[in-house]
Image: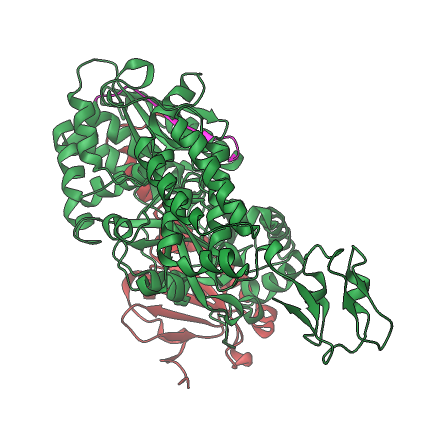
Chain colours: A green, B red
Amino acid sequence: MKQYRTHLLVCAGTGCVACNSYEIKKTLEAEITKRKLQDEIAVIATGCNGFCERGPIVVVQPEGIFYQRLKTEDIPHLVEEHLLKGRPVKKLMYVPPKEELPIPKMMDIGFFRHQLLIVLRNRGRIDPENIEEYIAFDGYQALEKALTKMTPEQIIDVVKESGLRGRGGAGFPTGLKWERCRKAPGDVKYLICNGDEGDPGAFMDRSVLEADPHAVLEGMAIGAKAIGAQKGYIYVRSEYPLALKRVKIAIEQAEEYGLLGKNILGTGFDFSVEVARGAGAFVSGEETSLIAAIEGRIGIPRQRPPYPAQKGLWKKPTNINNVETWANVPQIIFKGAKWYSEIGTKTSKGTKIFSLVGKINNTGLVEVPMGISLKDIIYEIGGGIPKNKKFKAVQTGGPSGGCIPNQHLNLPIDYESLTEVGSMMGSGGMIVMDEDTCMVDVAKYFMNFLRDESCGKCLSCREGTHRMWEILDKITGGRGIMEDLATLEELAMAVKDASMCGLGQTAANPILSALKYFPGEFVSHIKDKKCPAKVCKPLIKYTVIPERCTGCMACLKVCAYKAIEGKRKEVHKIIQEKCTKCGSCLQVCKFEAVLVE
Amino acid sequence: MKLKIGDLEKLRDKVKRTAEVREGKYRAKITVHMGTCGIAAGARDVMAALMDDIERKKIKDVIITTSGCAGLCSREPMVTVEVVGKPPVKYVDLTAEKIKKIVNSHIEKGVIVKECALAIGSERTH
């Protein structure tokens, strides 16, 4: 490998690619060649840096300078100033909200400084399509250790002692799961990597597969040795084309280097991995449903037991873990159980990746130690709520989780604490909501998602989610009655108790947590026929404040439904029958003369 | 190429420099001053010779970077050599030959090349 003095790490995660990062890379390469720097400077496409809000991102190493929101027209100046003349370009650096001075170095930026990277250690650092870069950062060392210096029992013991728990959401101890599958009778065993990430707004698994696919493969190969499996499947949804592409490249390269396939590293151990493409149903993330999908059947869950560890894929003992869980394994084997178990809380060890989305300044992907408070994630890493709005709640665990209000912001996050307050860890979605979010509307949104995704096998889930959605729709439409709240709660409990799989069992969480923490909002919708957050259209009304209206006609012109009448320099009026409550007039009015109530 | 036991480590060491540059880890840092004056005086030739030398000698723990004009335009090309834990040394009036000498002596043996050195230490910053 040629030596270069400077490495330009261009983020090529899905977010940055969508913001044109491949074009940035091409322009960089062209400019570098133009300046005859091509033998001194390397340009590398890496996986997602996590700071998706600021893409496209380029990091200059070894200095660690962080450039963000780049445009192709910035590149000639950047190359001449920084790469040729050694003067970092301030105007392309990150300036935190409410501050004026740019922060040149990546590790000085709050978003990065407060994170702890184990699973994502190679993000933004290696080219995921080049196995030698993974090897440069100690890649596959753990596999060599596991194959040459450890017995299967020792591997399982290390994973058990590390305290690693399933990152898919339920938090089952990984070592124990492996042991059960190892002890299950039978010669043929399978491994599955669950990459069917379906929560709205979540992209942890996607990012791991895109940024560091070899970490997942290495984890699976170690698991295969421990369990005694010969074949593994990575189930990725078809909506993740980049992840699919990189995983396939990684498998090919690992086979070429003798790290997968027959006789791995010459030790006589065989293990191969195949990619199974999913059609993307939320319920396919449930393990028995996912197994059915790989077998070519419809992705519908079945009754457990027997658990997959006894009877899984093709009725053989099968161990199924989430992408993030597998990616933790190499580091645990390489650095030891003690190192891992020192991070986190009493019951939850290591780190967790969260996708931080919603009303937050620094949208992106963050990896933090278990036990960190929600407040630190939202304010120190996330940079707080935009536009000086007030924080209202954060939804963790997606449609299976619940909302957590202000009073629990200091809660140290782990599997147990989140369940205690009525939510759950889930796979790591974290949706931040501000004062402009209506909690009834959010509950309705999730219920709509769930009634759509329910496979329909259990009546309680199929009918229950639909009926709960109907009631919420009634309440947000201003047609609710107080008895609806009791009915909702009763239905919620029935769906929870009578459904077979996780989808139904957790379906009521968004409603129950919203009812628990924000009962007042439900009551205002029902009794006062008002939506306090001014979201639910049937309950709000747009009017013009006559004292403020200057008659500038701006709102009149923007209204697509001709629902505003008036003449120049005369007070305008909104015709309620025609108004669709789209809010366009509110946005264009410079005199704050449009009132929403 | 099928790897065997032990090959991984060899491969890792071969690509180790990649890792060190990306992590900003180094034993010594050489800064070539690349202001307009430096470039006019031949700083890019010095840089090319320096990189060639580092690669030829398979030195993996030294990073090379650039900076702007150091203010002493008449003595360009200039480089600053910082061995970790030691004060930085500024070298002046460099050529491709002289920089190789500096790598040979200062970087590899820790002996400052006095005839090319301007001063030890840096300006104060405020």
Which residue appears at 56% of the width and 63% of the height?
A: A84
Residue A493 vertical position relative to residue A182 in the rendered view, above or below: below
**Residue at the (47%, 44%) spot, across then down:** A446
Please name the residue shown 25% across and 51% down the image. A420
Membership of A229 in magenta stretch: yes
Residues B83 and B108: in front is B83
Give x and y (percent) for residue B26: 33, 60
Question: Is A104 in front, or is A427?
Answer: A427
Q: Position of residue B15 (x, y in %)?
A: 37, 44
**Residue A256 magenta-drawn?**
no
The image shows residue B120, relative to residue A481, as above or below, that is: below
- Left or right of B64? Residue B42 is right
Q: Quadrant of the C terminus of chain A?
A: bottom right
Q: Position of residue A337 (x, y in %)?
A: 16, 44
Residue A319, given in percent of the width and then of the height, sits at: 27, 26
A341 or B80: nearer the viewer: A341
Residue A335: which quarter of the image? Answer: top left
Visible residue check, residue A12: no
Magenta residue span: A228-240
Near-viewer residue (A254 or A408): A408
Horizontally, residue A412 falls left or right of residue B81, namely: left
At 32% from the left and 68% from the top, the residue drawn is B83
Residue sitting at the far right: A567
Relative vertical location of residue A522 with respect to residue A228 in this rendering, above or below: below
Q: How many circles with numbers are drawn on the protein?
A: 0
Is residue B106 in view?
Answer: yes
**Is A381 situated left or right of A45 in this image?**
left
Q: Quadrant of residue A456?
A: top left
**Screen quadrant of the N terminus of chain A:** top left
| A502 sits to left or right of A477 | left
A66 w.r.t. A307: above or below: below
